[in-house]
Image (tube, rainbow, N blue to C red):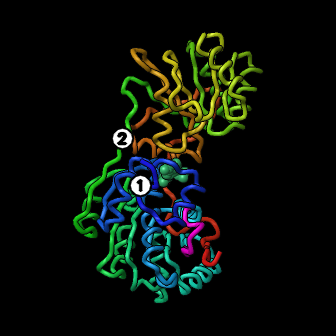
Amino acid sequence: MKFTEFGFDGRLMEGIEASNYEDATPVQQQVIPLILKGKDIIASAQTGTGKTAAFLLPLINRIITEHTDGITITVLVIVPTRELAIQIAQHLEGLSYFTSISSIAVFGGGDGNAFVQEKKALSMGADIVVCTPGKMMSHIKMGYVKLDNLKYLVLDEADRMLDMGFFDDIMFIIKHLPAKRQNLLFSATMPPKIRQLARSILHEPAEINISISKPPEKIIQQAYMVYDAQKIPLILHLLKENNFKTVLIFCSSKLNVKALTRDLKRNGIKAGEIHSDLEQESREDILIQYKSGRLPVLVATDILSRGIDIDNIDLVINFDVPHDGEDYVHRIGRTARAEADGTAFTLVSVKEQRKFLAIEKLLEKVVQKMPLPEAFGEQPSYNPIFEKRGGGKKKSFQHRGVRNK
Ligand code: AMP
């Protein structure tokens, strides 16, 4: 489905085109028309499905066409973490670039100075505020946040917010919103407590379920907790100790692909690399060598995770944890195709543990954690800590006065 079919305002279409979006994703196809109609929504959709644009686009369109004043807050988007707040604010800035919409991101952490800046921005107001719950609650308590004309409330990654203990903060904020408003709730999972939250704040919601496919059960999935410096030695060890014939190793960046391939070759392992810096001809040549068995190990970025047609890969290694669950499923799905069995190892550094936990939750599967061989020395334990509320590093404020650009 093309974006032109939604009847969006021309200025918004320019932002969509500039973002290089052509077809709407499944979640966008389902959610956008309902939001435009004014329906409340409860959607189970994970990161990577295009869910952010699914709510931003219709809301931007409504703001443009309803001619808001840009001073009182029309849309409040509540999210669990500062990273997500920043990401959504950037997404918003891209999509609304050709409009006169104003937005603010308000998120936890930071010093007193940041709070003062946030206070100033919130007192000035904006069409859209993207916030974390604790920080927004503190501002509301101070009395300068103008919520009387709010029309749309979005709760994004609601399950994660509840896991992080934000229920009371969210309810506090909601008590300060006008009763007549449109509510949109997005959550990767739908445990009973999310249904309960939904019942208390949504009005006759439309329910949308975009679930990702799960990897075949027959794939043996294992994970190694490692320090960064242990990753390459562990890969060398795994390749030398096991008798895998066709191995595909995924890295999230071209740099890692290049560095790892170089180290494999230095250690006498026949390995090829595939990434976007290579000409199509070289990529095809390497794939032919790999498919024929002349090249047993291929190191690649995610460009190879979807749609490649190689049936006999017996081991997939994630050199780093993929960005989201969908990428994980696509990557490990390269093994155990057709009748074959397959194995997938994921190397998880300390800072990737949280991402890995999110993948396990999404797949509703606890991946077996493997001990490192003794010669590797100490191994980090698996202790994925969710970002602490309110605390943490510096800086907490961005004010995007994108009016009159
Ligand atoms: P999200 O699930 O919202 O985190 O989005 C995942 C990624 O998909 C983001 O980088 C978006 O910019 C991108 N994206 C969202 N919608 C589309 C679309 N219709 N076409 C192409 N990319 C998209």
Q: Distance from label 2 to label 1 (Cα)?
A: 36 Å
Q: Which residues are magenta?
A: 95-103
Q: Position of residue 184 (x, y in %)?
A: 35, 64
- Residue 360 drawn in magenta: no
Q: Nearer the viewer, residue 138 or 57?
A: 57
Q: Position of residue 214 (x, y in %)?
A: 38, 35
Q: Nearer the viewer, residue 13 or 267?
A: 13
From the viewer's perspective, tell me whether residue 268 is left or right of residue 249.
right
Q: Quadrant of residue 392?
A: bottom right
Q: Do the residues under discs 2 and 1 have CB atoms within 8 angstroms?
A: no
Q: Is residue 83 visible to us here? A: no
Magenta span main SS: loop
> Which residue is labeled 1 in the image?
5
Label 2 residue SS: loop
> Which residue is labeled 2 in the image?
364
Q: Amino acid at mark 2?
A: Glu
Q: Position of residue 71 (x, y in %)?
A: 51, 84
